[in-house]
Image (cartoon, rainbow, N blue to C red):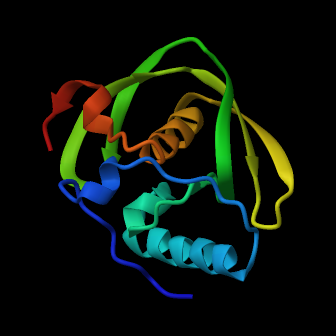
Amino acid sequence: MARRNIVKMGDPVLRKKSKEVTEFDGRLGCLLDDMKDTLHFAEGLGLAAPQVGVLKRVCIVEYDGVLYELVNPVLTHAEGKCTDDEGCLSVPGFRGLVERPQIIDVTYFDREGNRHVQHAEGYFARVFLHEMDHLDGILFPDKMIKKLPE
């Protein structure tokens, strides 16, 4: 396990669409372990593989002390709307208001290839959606409705 460098806004890798994971092997496990170390060091809530320079549909979210490892996540349900502030490890020193669904369901696989469905509401849902946006080359300033002071 090792910490990886977090790619910052302006790097073209953050604007590319990630590829689906097809092999659930040791390399995937190593990537997830490295992402966890990187996330903990950076003291963030979530991290997507493109943020460490890897164009794979992989992200992690740590919320209320639980680590979620999402491989090939897909939004299967969304309802309601909520506007709240967001920041990003790849966009340091910048915060803004973003409107997102209030309630979501996400289907994803874990590192072993087991399928899961996660229901999330409020800020928990927001973190999932923020990280999943990275997998499609979208950064939160793209969806921001108002910049907030630092």
Q: Nearer the viewer, residue 53 or 139?
A: 53
Q: Is residue 38 left or right of residue 6?
A: right
Indicate the quadrant where residue 111 lies: bottom right
Q: Quadrant of the N terminus?
A: bottom right
Q: Is residue 32 above or below residue 80?
A: below
Residue at position x 49%, y 62% in the image: 49
The x, y position of residue 62, in whole percent, is 59, 57
- The residue lying toward the viewer, choosing from 92 and 6, is 6
Residue 17 image position (x, y, % from top left): 44, 47
Q: Does the rendering let one see residue 88?
A: no
Query: In the image, what residue occupies the spot 47% across and 60% down?
Result: 55
Tell me residue 2's x, y (percent): 49, 87
* Residue farthest to the left, as pictured: 149
Height in image: 60 above or below 40?
A: above
x, y percentage for residue 112? 82, 67
Q: Residue at x 49, y 52 (%)?
A: 18
